[in-house]
Amino acid sequence: PKVQAEVNPAAAPVEAPRQIAPEIDTSFERAAVSAILSGIVGGAVGGVPEPPPPPAAPVRVGGAIKPPVKTRDVRPQYPPIAQSARIQGVVIIEATISPQGKVQDARVLRSIPLLDGAALDAVRQWEFTPTLLNGVPVPVIMTVTVQFTLT
């Protein structure tokens, strides 16, 4: 049988060490532990600051929400292929206007395929007065029409 020596790591050493290692400063760790134990979130007085509120969801025009006023109007470029095919009519677009009055999103609701791209390009360049809700600028969703007429 193999003989095993009993090792007790908690026992005092038989020999005295020649040099003692310097003591490590643990005051920060103790402060953090005491802060956690005393209930201060994040170890700081007042805790971690609240996250910013999520951006406001766009509101629809209607009722008490008045449509923003267009301040920059860009007319669409009539596509040559649609012009030569004598295609005319109305493209209806749903546009989301940012709190700053810029068109941030636009999608076609009623389509004339050869005219949709030109209508979207024009609407995306439009600018509006900001829509205010309780005195605060908010994003707004509105429906716009783009008329294509041959002369």
Image (cartoon, rainbow, N blue to C red):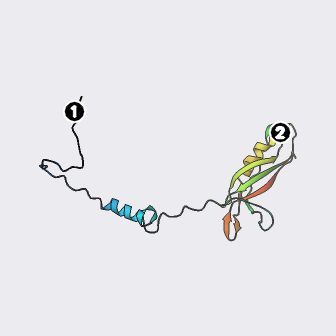
Q: What residue is pinned by disc 1? A: 3
Which residue is pictured at 77% across the width and 57% down the height? Answer: 142
Image position of 16 (left or right of 148): left
Outermost residue on the top side: it is 1
Image position of 136 (left or right of 25): right
Residue 73 versus residue 88 in the image, above or below: below
Give the alpha-carbon distance from disc 2 to disc 1, as whole Å: 98 Å
Which residue is pictured at 50% across the width and 64% down the height? Answer: 49
Residue 82 numbered tag: 2
Give the residue type at disc 2.
Answer: Ala
Which residue is pictured at 76% across the width and 44% down the height? Answer: 118
Q: Quadrant of the N terminus?
A: top left
Kind of element beneath mark 2: helix
Label 2: how many Cα within 10 Å (few below 14, some 14–19, many 20+): some
Residue 114 numbered tag: none
Answer yes or no: do the residues labelled 2 and 1 have beta carbons within 8 Å? no
Give the residue type at disc 1.
Answer: Val
Q: Which of 40 and 102 is in front in this view?
A: 40
Which residue is pictured at 73% across the width and 47% down the height? Answer: 121
Residue 143: x and y, percent? 79, 55
Q: Could you say which quadrant of the image residue 79 lies in?
A: top right
Q: Could you say which quadrant of the image residue 29 lies in?
A: bottom left
Q: Could you say which quadrant of the image residue 26 lies in?
A: bottom left
Q: How many labels does the image show?
A: 2
Q: Which of 129 and 96 is in front in this view?
A: 96
Residue 121 visible? The answer is yes
Residue 134: x and y, percent? 69, 71
Residue 105 versus residue 135 in the image, above or below: above
Residue 150: x and y, percent? 87, 45
Q: Which of 115 and 16 is in front in this view?
A: 16
Q: Nearer the viewer, residue 1 or 96?
A: 1
Residue 124 visible? The answer is no
